[in-house]
Amino acid sequence: MADGPASDPLTRIQPDAVPASDAPFSQVVLDDDYAFFAGLVAADFPEGQAVLGDVGAETSAVLAAIGRMLEQLRLERERIVRVDVHLADLDDFDAMDAAYREFFPDGRYPARTTTESRRLFGDSRVEITCQVRR
C-alpha cells in the first residue's frame, strides 16, 4: 500500500513480509533511484520471534524477510548497495557474518557497516537496514 500526495516524489510502502505498526516510520520509502528499508529485527514479525536469542538464526530470519520485501518490490539481492547491521553485542559478529554471507549470491556483497547497539527492539540481537538501487 502506497500513500502520499500526488506531487510527492516519494512512495511509502508497507510490505507484506512485515506486519503493519502504529510506529511513526515507513517500512520502505522509494524515490526515483533507491528503495530505503527501515531497520528490521526478528521481533518485528511472527516467524522471527521464534528464533530470538540465536544471532545466526535471527540474521537469517531478518534477511529472509528482506528477501521477501525485495521480491514484492521486484528487486534483486544484487541491487542492495548498502547495509547497516546493529548487533546487541559485537562479540556476536562472527555468528551474524556467517548467516549474512549465505544471503548474497557469488560474494556480491554491498557496502556494510556493523555497530554495537546494546538495546534493540523486542530483545532482538540483530537489526538490519539496507538501501537498494532500483
Image (spheres, helix red, strand yellow):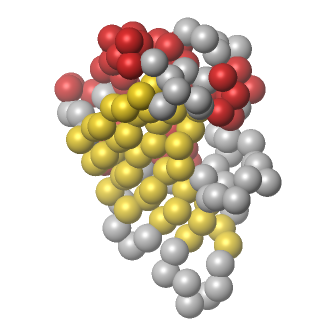
User: Is residue 124 toward the left or the right of residue 101 in the image?
Assistant: right
Task: Point out residue 67 in the picture as x, y percentages from the top left corner.
Answer: 48, 36
Against 19, residue 74 (above or below) is below
Task: Point out residue 129 in the picture as x, y percentages from the top left corner.
Answer: 46, 42
Going 37% across and 52% down the picture, which residue do you hit? 132
- Single out the residue that lies furthest toward the front: 118
Going 28% across and 48% down the picture, which residue do you hit? 81
Q: If the image is split into quadrants, where does the N terminus sit?
A: bottom right
Task: Point out residue 23 in the picture as x, y percentages from the top left corner.
Answer: 73, 53
Residue 31 placement: quadrant: bottom left
Residue 19 placement: quadrant: top right
Residue 5 placement: quadrant: bottom right
Whether residue 47 is visible to the viewer of this picture, yes or no, is: no
User: Is residue 71 toward the left or the right of residue 93 in the image?
Assistant: right
- Single out the residue that lies furthest toward the right: 22
Going 56% across and 70% down the picture, which residue do you hit? 11
- Single out the residue that lies furthest toward the bottom: 7
Against 128, residue 94 (above or below) is above
Whether residue 130 is visible to the viewer of this picture, yes or no, is: yes
Q: Nearer the viewer, residue 48 or 134?
A: 48
Task: Point out residue 122 in the picture as x, y percentages from the top left corner.
Answer: 70, 28
Q: If the image is split into quadrants, where does the C terminus sit?
A: bottom left
Going 21% across and 33% down the picture, which residue do you hit? 108
Against 105, residue 19 (above or below) is below
Q: Nearer the viewer, residue 131 or 92?
A: 92
For the image, the number of numbered tags is 0
